[in-house]
Image: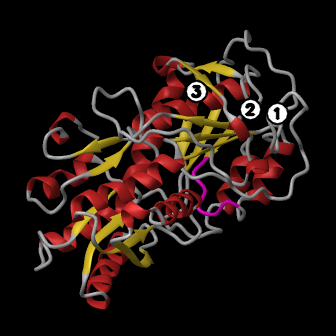
Amino acid sequence: MTVRSRMPVRALATATALALGLAACGGTTKKSSEDSGGAAPAGATAKADPNAPLKKGLKLAFLPKQVNNPYEKIVDDAGIAAAGEFSGSAKEVGPSDASASSQVSYINTLIQQQHDAILIAANDENAVCGPLKQAMAKKIKIVAYDSDTAKDCRNLFINQASSEEIGRSQIKMVSEQLGGKGDIAILSATANATNQNTWIKFMQDELKKPEYSGLKLVKVAYGDDDDQKSFQQTQGLLQAYPNLKGIIAPTTVGIAAAARYISGSKYKGKVAVTGLGTPDQMRKFVKDGTVKQFALWNPKDLGYLASYAAAALSSGQITGAQGQTFKAGKLGDRTIGADGEVILGPPTVFDAKNIDEFHF
């Protein structure tokens, strides 16, 4: 999940910079000696023309983890609207489930339809690699957003915020709410989701610090970004771990389901719920006291930035090489970091004091 920095609110105090470290699909393309180490994004060795105009009539396609995910819908709708600003067109296609291989057939269809760019939030970083490489061989640009593919399977990754910042901040939030003591659980999306697993890795690392010695992670559960399954997983966690004091759900579907269960149960006020959610879906749970604090970036900005990045790639302004810059409409100039990553900005913390300022 991605959350953006143009909002006039307080951002997480622990903002740090980090590029996702994900395993590659086995490609052999390397950065030149002038780059700062690591594998170069696919196609980054081509020559860029930063002064080239954006092409007219570009065809973009957004392929989310699943089309019935409210968060992904916000992202994609904003990206589709952004395409109109540069006289392009965009659409959203995708599966209704978030399984590892569910996106493959859609990629194959988009290749046949000869889109200029495919923008994908990957359910599995490796399962989509084969068809994405086929698309790239046909000069179709690939932009990952929200959840990355393996690095050699795309040109750019639009990351909502620093992955380290997101992961570590989740532990800090739950620790503050529990006074630094208690059993906690993580309610994730799917077991193969690149972004979720990266955030969880940093959560686990953060828990090793002495200041969190009073916290104990008892379980990582998976709700598969399905509302009912996430609801049932919350119930199961509370039954299996009677001393559970906190649940971290770094997924908009999971945090809403967990809050809904706890708000109507005996655990309300006794078990803290935090994670990543949208203000509109979490407002009632903040106002009724079920949730004290959670975080997110602006998903509209994530889709907007991804759309402009795809246009810049397709127009030859950039190739995905580190240090290149491009203009992203109202979001201003953006610079490509290591491994073809562009970071939107730090997430925002929402609570009872500021949640009514936001509507998405």
Q: Which residue is drawn at 47% across and 42% down?
A: 76
Q: How far apart are marks 2 and 3 (CA)?
A: 13 Å
Relative depth, front residue between 350 and 326: 350
Residue where numbered disc 2 is placed: 320
Q: Mark 2 or mark 3: which is in front?
A: 2
Q: Mark 3 or mark 1: which is in front?
A: 1
* Res. 74 in view: yes
Relative depth, front residue between 286 and 224: 286
| SS majority, magenta | loop
- As shown in the figure, which amino acid type bears the numbered disc 1? Ala
Residue where numbered disc 1 is placed: 44
Residue where numbered disc 3 is placed: 308
Q: Residues within 10 Å of mark 3 (few under 14, many from 20)?
A: many
Q: Residues within 10 Å of mark 1 (few under 14, many from 20)?
A: many
User: Could you tell me residue 37's position as x and y percent?
Assistant: 81, 40
Relative depth, front residue between 236 and 216: 216
Q: The residue tagged with tag 1: helix, strand or loop?
A: loop
Q: Earlier in the sequence, mark 2 or mark 3?
A: 3
- Residue 199 vertical placement versus 220 (above, below): above
Q: Residue 228 carries which label?
A: none
| In this picture, residue 147 sits left or right of residue 176 | right
Q: Which residue is drawn at 41% across and 59% down?
A: 68
- Residue 27 vertical placement versus 8 (above, below): below
Magenta span: 120-125
The quadrant holding residue 235 is bottom left
Q: Which residue is drawn at 65% across and 18% down?
A: 56
The quadrant holding residue 176 is bottom left
Per the image, is 348 magenta? no
| In this picture, residue 143 sits left or right of residue 214 | right
